[in-house]
Image (cartoon, rainbow, N blue to C red):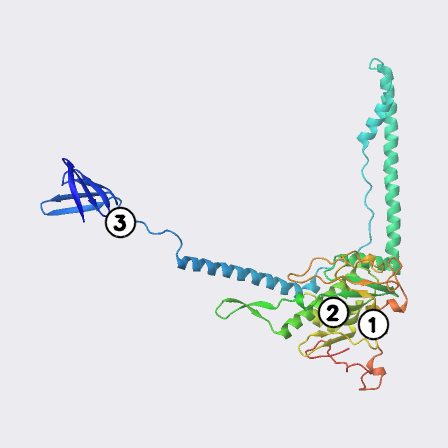
Amino acid sequence: MGFSFKVAPGVRVRATSHGVRASVGPRAARVHVGTGRTGFSTGLGPVSMYKAAGGGRRPRNLGPSRSSVAAHERQLRQAQKTQQAAELKAAFDAIENLHRQEVIPTTPPVAPSPAPVNETAIRRWHEQQALQGLSIMQRQARTTARKRAAEGAQRDINAAVERGFREQAQVQRQLDEQWRRLLGNDPDVVFATLTEAFEDNQAPVAVTGVENGETSVLIMVPGIEAVPERMPKLAPAGNLSIAKITKTLRNSFYLGLICGHVLITVREALAVAPCLQAVRVAVIRQAPPDAYGIRKAECLLAAMFTRHRLDGVLWDSTAAIQIVQDTSADLRIRLSGTREPLPLDLAREPALAALLQVIDTSESEPPGRADELGDGSPGHTAGSQLPGAAAAPHPTVSAPTLLMGQPPTTPTAMLPAPHPPRSSREPGAPQAGHAKRCSSPLAPSSCCS
């Protein structure tokens, strides 16, 4: 309901329940303003037309629609999955290629060149000393003083150069003596060289002894948590998925990680000590806490590697597990049916068992240098970790098992020697307290000690 009234010729006001509007102009061209949108109308006789200014309906909400928001969320989830897949692939690649890292053989050390002599400073000092007390009017005396200063400066320069070469020669003699002792497998030099070389290893390494061209090392490896539980896969349709891997497959990767740490440690030891002939390795891991909350070390693998057995290995195309199996001597390892590495039974390995008793794997101690082992100080500092891998605790070996600077050569400091070959014992009879030795210790479902 509403009403309208004429205000002036050509001007009419209409009031309704929706508001007030005004019409201006003749019927043939009339403008409507007020409540609502402005419009124009025209009419002749019984026919009239109306057109709102701006045309069309009012604009709707311009915000994102539900379909666009859902599409954006799908793209975001796909991007996150792609990034996660790339990180997982990098982690598995790092495990498979751990033993393929480049190892640069050591070369005879060369003393650095002498520091250059600052001739300008020496000449300036001599000239300043010679001209002290002479005025600018004493030209002849100043000329003579400058000449004497130049001669003195040249003598000092020659003396400094000669002194630099003498010091270089002295350092070179010391380096040559160290190199000679390294080639002679001097225990002190080999011990210090290996300790320094292992400082940046991913897995902490402690040298336990050097004797007769052979060294013994302990390698602390991380737990199974270093291997991701999921692996990226491509479906037949090309869709990317990240599925959980089986326990057997994960244990296989973990075994490869252990063998990779063993091989890179052995390769580095033989590279920095050119005349070292054998490396005896024991791989340890932090055991679960006992009833007192103490986490001790458990041995997962023990083996010996010789230089001549590693010559000619195809590192770039051979897996770490196969290399360990084919090149090691007296390999001792226990695997469950799902290829899980199990702790070795050290009942008949008293030396190795005694060594594990004095290893401190406490995580409360901060990491330190490997050459601080045996002083009650923290163990070796680990380098960069594998992607997604947890840092292994740093082993600390108490004195007198390790005496840094004075490497022990007693049998208790060396890892246990290999058992006599099976041919020297009664045919077919396994050792007491030991499982029967398998022909392929790293084969599936094997259990060897």
Question: Which of the 4 image quarters holds residue 43?
Answer: top left
Q: Which mark is residue 289?
A: 2
Q: Sequence-wise, which precedes: disc 1 or disc 2?
A: 2
Question: Which amino acid lies under the numbered mark 3 shown in the image of this protein?
Answer: Gly
Which residue bears the numbered disc 3?
Answer: 56
Which residue bears the numbered disc 1?
Answer: 353
Secondary structure of the residue carrying numbered label 1 = helix
Label 2 packing within 10 angstroms: few (<14), some (14-19), many (20+)? few
Q: CA distance from mark 3 to mark 2?
A: 77 Å
Q: CA distance from mark 1 to mark 2?
A: 18 Å
Secondary structure of the residue carrying numbered label 3 = loop
Picture coordinates of residue 164 (x, y %)? 86, 40
Label 1 packing within 10 angstroms: few (<14), some (14-19), many (20+)? some
Picture coordinates of residue 310 (x, y %)? 76, 68
Q: CA distance from mark 1 to mark 3?
A: 90 Å
Question: Which of the 4 image quarters holds residue 429?
Answer: bottom right
